[in-house]
Image (cartoon, grey):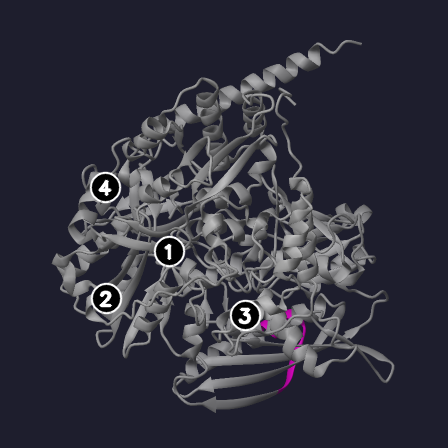
Amino acid sequence: MCLGIPGEVIELHAEQPDLAKVNVSGVRRMINIGLLSDDPPVPGEWVLIHVGFALSKIDEQEAAATLQFLEGTGQAYEDELAALKASVIE
Amino acid sequence: MRFVDEFRDADKAHALAAKIAALCEPGRQYKLMEVCGGHTHTIYKHGLEDYLPESITLVHGPGCPVCVIPMGRVDDAIHLASQPDVIMTSFGDMMRVPGSGGSFFDANAEGTHIRMVYSPLDSLKIARQNPDKRVVFMAIGFETTAPSTAMTMIRAKAEGLENFSVFCNHVTIVPAIKAILDSPDLRLDGFIGPGHVSTVIGCRPYEFIAKQYGKPVVVAGFEPLDILQSIYMLMLQLSQGRSEVENQYARVVPWDGNLVALKAIGETMELRPYFEWRGLGFISHSALKVHEKYAAMDAELIFQVPGVRVADPKACQCGEVLKGVLKPWECKVFGTACTPETPIGTCMVSPEGACAAYYNFGRMNRNRVAEAGVAGS
Amino acid sequence: MSKSWIDEALAQSELGHEGLAAEGRRQLPLADREQQVLDRIDRARRRRPKVREERVTMSHGAGGKATQTLIEAVFLDAFRNPLLEPLEDAAQLTVSGARIALTTDSYVVSPLFFPGGDIGDLAVNGTVNDLAVSGARPLYLSAGFILEEGFPVADLQRVTESMRAAAERAGVSVVTGDTKVVQKGKADGCYVNTAGVGVVERDGALGAARAQPGDAIVVSGPIGDHGITIMLARGELDIEADICSDTAPLNGLVADLLDAVPGVRAMRDATRGGVATILNEIARAADVGVLAVEDAIPVRAEVRGASELLGIDPMYVACEGRLVAVVPGEDADRAVAALRAHPLGERAAVIGHVRAEQPGIVQLKTAFGGTRIVDLLVGDPLPRIC
C-alpha cells in the first residue's frame, strides 16, 4: 500500500490538465495529477508518486525541518563524540 | 535521489539510535507495532533493527493489503479471469499469491490472461486496445491506492469505456488497527502509523488510538531515518507519559488528508457491511466495493463470482503473524514447508509480508549497534 | 498447482508438528529458539530440490530459485554426469588432449530491438561471455533461428547484421546454424539459440567452488542496465529514461584481468537473476559466506531511479555486459585496476568479500549501516505497489 516515490514535476501536459511529466533521478514518466486538483503542482515542485498518480505535494519546508532535526541530532552526536575523544584521560 | 538519500544517512542513524536507547527504562520491554507492510519492508531491507536496543521489539502489523486477501478471493479472481475474453490486470504483488489451486502465474500457465500493470490507468489502455475483450482490474490496496482506482473509474466513465470493470478488494486501515487493539493476546506500547494511507485519510482517524486506548501514534515516512525518528518520538512520548498522534512524515502527509482523493473514493465506492480478512476474520465496515452508481463497472455484478470461503490451511498461522502475536520464525511451518518458493500463506508471498521480509532479509543473527542504558555507544 | 500441494509441502518438510512442540517445551531463551529455527531452515534449504508445480510457469525462466530447482530436479537429474554437475557458465571438456569449453544459450527477449542493441547482439555477446568467464578464448559459434510466420525479413536482416558486427568485435565466427519457421503466434517474432566453443589456454581451474574466505568479489561496472532497459522498452510502463543495454563482449576484458591476476578463482557473467544470484551461487558452490557492501555496488542514477519507482532491487536485475569475479583478497586492487584500464570496465569495484561465517548465506551491509540477507528470488523481480 505504501510504495511512494518523490519526483520533480518538470512539465505539465499541454492538452490534458490532469497529466504531468515527472523526473525521478533522470527517469521520466507521465503521471496523473488529478488527485491534486485543489492545488495543482507546477514545474519545479515535488510530488509523491504512487501507481502512476501524485498523491500529495512534498512540502520542502517540512522536509527541511525534518532534516534539521536529524542534522541536529547528528551534530549533537558528533559534538559528544568529539568531546569524549578530547577528554580521554591519559 | 532527493528526498530519499538524505533520509538514509547512516551517520544520523547512530545518533538517533543512542537517543532511543537512552529513553529506555531499565528492565522494561517495549513493543511497538508498525502497521504498514511498507514499513516492515524498509525495516528489514535496511537492517534497521540493528540500530535498536534489545528492549525494543518491533511487531509487524496487518498493513499489507496483499497479505490480508483470503484465498477464496484469489480463487474468485482466477475464476473471473477464466471467463471467455477476459483480460485481468493486476499489480505485481498479487501475481504469486496462492489461492487454493495456485496463483495468478499458475493460472496463466493453465490459460488465463492475467497481465501485470504498474498503474490502474494501464488497464484503461489495455481496454482501449482490445475492444473485443473484457478487461477486469484486480483492485487491491488500502486507502493509499483506492483513490487511484477511483480516478481510473471516473476516467473510464468519462470516456464511455464499456469493456472495463473493477474487482474491488480495497480495504481500510482503521478497522484493522481497532481489531489489533481489541485483541486480547496482544499488548502494544505504541504504533508507527501508516505513512501513505495518511496522505489520503489524514492523521485524525488515529486519534481514537491515543485518546481511547492510551497508545501513542507517530505517522511515519518510509526511509529508514523516518522510521528511526518515529521510534524516537514514540519513546519520547512514552517516557513523558503522553499519548498523542504526531506526524513525523509532515513533508508528505497533510493533517487533514486529501479531500479530492476522499471525494473520488466516495463517488465510486462504498463500504461493505463486512469483509473477510485473512487471519483476522470478518471485520465490519472494513472494505470497499464499487458504488451502485458505477454498477456497470462492478465485476462482481457483471460476472458471477463464486464467493466460496476457503479456510486457511490448518498449518497456516498467518493470522497470528498478521496480528503481531507470533514472530515469523515462531510459525510452525516458517522456512520449512512455507518458503517464498512454496508459500502456504500470504505473509510469505508478498514482499512486504512479515514472513517474506524476515525470510528474505532478516534471517540471521543481529549485531546491534546500541544497547539500552549505554548512551553514545 | 494441484490442490494437494499444501499437504505435499507439509509432508516434505522435515518438521513434524510434534517435533516443534517438543522443542518449544524446552523453553529456551528467545534468541536460542530463533537460532534453532534458523538452523532448521538451513537444513531444509539444503534438501534435494523437487519441482512441485505441474506446469512450467514464468518463474521457472527468471534465473532465481524456481529456475535452479527446475535445472536440478529435472535436467541435472536426467542428464547427470561429472561434466554437467558443476553447472558453471560453460562445460570444461578435454577432447583428444585439447582443453575446450562448450556453452549454449537461447535468446527470447522481447522486444527484439531496444536501446543499446538487439537480440542479435545478445545472442553473440552472451555466448562469447559465457566462454570468456570460463577461462576460454571464444572461437566458434553456431546460430539456430526459430522464426515466426510473418516475421519481416528486413528485421531478420537487422538481427543478422548485428550478429555479424558483434562476432567481428568479439573475434569469433558463426560457422554453422539452423532455421525453423513456426506458425503465427509462436516464437514472438524470432528466437535465437547460440552455442559456442572456445579453447582453454591458461592453466588453473576456474569455478565458483574455489572461492575461499578472504577473497574479494569484484564487479566490472554498473549493474542493472540491461534488465531495466528491457522493462522500459516493453512500453507498458510509460517510463522514459536514457538507459541502454550494456550488452558487450567481455573476452578482451577477461583476458586483461587474467593477465593481471592469474590467480582469479571464478568469474561469472551477470545475466538474468543479476548480481544477487551470482553471489548466492558462489556462497552455495563453495559453502562460504558472502558479505557485500551496498554502498560499493555501482548503479547508474537512472537505473536506481527506475528501480525505486517500480519497487525493484537492482541487485536482481539482469546485465549483459558485466562480469563478477572472485579474486584472492591481496589481488583485489590489481584486479580493479586491470578492469578499469579497459573501456568496458570503467566503474569496476570491489563489492564484497568471502568469509567463513554463515556459509551458504549472502549478507549485505546496507547503505544505512544495518545488515540484511540477500537471498535468491523465486522468479523475476516483480514491480510492487506496497
Q: Mark 4 against mark 2, which lies toward the viewer? A: 2
User: Gap in Å between the C-alphas at discs 4 and 3?
Assistant: 49 Å
Q: Looking at numbered disc 1 in the image, what kind of residue is underneath it? A: Ile
Chain bearing mark 1? C
Residue visible at 58% across and 66% down in the picture: C10
Query: Would residue A41 be found to the left or right of residue B19 on screen?
Result: left
Residue visible at 57% across and 89% down in the picture: C178
The secondary element bearing badge 2 is classed as: helix
Chain bearing mark 4? A
Is A48 above or below relative to C303?
Answer: above
Q: Are marks 1 and 2 in contact (CB under 8 Å)?
A: no
The residue at which mark 2 appears reads as B299
Q: Are marks 1 and 4 in contact (CB under 8 Å)?
A: no
The residue at which mark 4 appears reads as A36
From which residue to which does the magenta span run?
C165-176
Spot occupied by residue A14 in the image (x, y as percentages of width and height): 20, 50
The residue at which mark 1 appears reads as C239
Spot occupied by residue C61 in the image (x, y as percentages of width and height): 54, 71
Q: Looking at numbered disc 4 in the image, what kind of residue is underneath it? A: Leu
Q: Looking at numbered disc 2 in the image, what kind of residue is underneath it? A: Ala
Q: Residues within 10 Å of mark 2 (few under 14, many from 20)?
A: many
The secondary element bearing badge 1 is classed as: strand
Q: Mark 4 against mark 3, which lies toward the viewer? A: 3
Asked whether B61 or C20 is in front, the reply is C20
The residue at which mark 3 appears reads as C7
